[in-house]
Amino acid sequence: MSGADGVDAEAPASRPDPGEWGEVSIGAGERRAVSITVSESYSGATIRTPVYVWRGMADGPTVFVSAAVHGDEINGTGAIRELITGEPFELIRGTLLMLPVVNMLGFERHSRYMPDRRDLNRCFPGTEHGSLSSRLARAFFDQVVRRCDYGIDLHTAAVRRTNFPNVRADMDDASVAEWARAFGAEILVAGKGPRGSLRRSACKAGVPTFILEAGEVWRVEPAVVEYAVEGVRSCLAHLGMIAGESRRPAYRVEMDTTRWVRAMHGGFLQFHTSPGELVEKGQPIATSASLTGQEHDVIVAPRDGIVLGMTTMPSVAPGDPVCHLAFPKRGVLRRVGEVVEAMADDSLHERLKEDLSRGILVSEPNGESEG
Ligand SMILES: [Zn+2]
């Protein structure tokens, strides 16, 4: 059967038991690392990826938390390692499946892509007889996603960019929207996600799944890890899998309109804002100048918005992305501004803003033009 998302994976005869992993049986209250076979290398070696299986004493939902579907996006890998090895917590019910690296072949090469140059996150749910990427997607989908009731997939911005943490989910689907809100993120971007993405395919297969986009590639950023761990725990609390309440963000904006502001000229950027900041229409975002400082132009916000992401690369050519803005409804931003103003400097929200702007030289716009 072929649908809008390409080849549909057929419904399985029965859902695999979350405690049965080949030769290994994991009982109630146990936690154990296993691995699943996802492919073979060019030298014929079996490619396996680790799954940390954690079972509560009582029956309950099965949730997967995955990272590095893009092999260079390892903030989520750091967050999952923290969930496994950090401050212990009791899993009351259900099963938690944690996959620090989905795209093991990309991860081994510090690369976003698979060795066949495909983007794994456009190949789900995959097919048994398809490309290398499609087969790996299918192996993951069958062995992990199909066991689950819910999923969380952890991403970062693409190379040379960084993102203020934001959750992306199909907010038109009530069960996905409820699950995504349980993470407790301040910023939610609505949308189904690209065709072939893990989250879109999982949702289509009846497993509500959203993504977190936070930080940048090739790094494990402490504030991002803290944010991701809090969010996952908030989701588990929402399902009654761990004790406590789910996280209530200081503000919440949900929107479906975002836009990249791009450079008009080649040059070197000086930034005037950073991820997570609010900007007003006409406010300078960055100044593009020659290498010796003569200004070319001041890049301004086209509308009132929130800075979702930025380039971390100060040298740009015409058309290069500078700043990713999200546009909440009118009136919302003013209220958000008041809430943010009242936040303590050591709040996670403010520490994130500080951490994420560390790799960007931010300065006041210069009133005087030398050009
Ligand atoms: Zn990604």
Image (cartoon, helix red, strand yellow):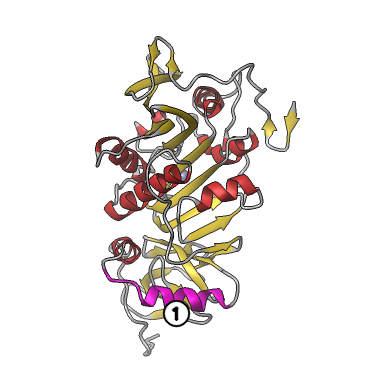
Locate residue 64, reporting x and y percent: 46, 34
Residue 334 among those drawn in magenta:
yes
Residue visible at 73% across and 33% down? 3
Locate residue 90, reporting x and y percent: 32, 36
Locate residue 217, reporting x and y percent: 36, 48
Locate residue 132, reporting x and y percent: 52, 24
Residue visible at 35% across and 42% down? 74
Residue, disc 1 = 284
Q: Main secondary structure of the magenta part?
A: helix
- Residue 336 visible? The answer is yes
Q: In the rendered view, would you say 69 is above or below 332? A: above
Q: Nearer the viewer, residue 200 or 86?
A: 86
Q: In the rendered view, would you say 186 is above or below 84? A: below
Q: In the rendered view, would you say 88 is above or below 332? A: above
Looking at the image, which residue sits at the far top?
23
Indicate the quadrant containing the C terminus: top left, top right, bottom left or bottom right.
Answer: bottom left
The secondary element bearing badge 1 is classed as: strand
Residue visible at 60% across and 76% down? 330
Quadrant in the picture for residue 106: top left
The residue range painted magenta reads: 331-345
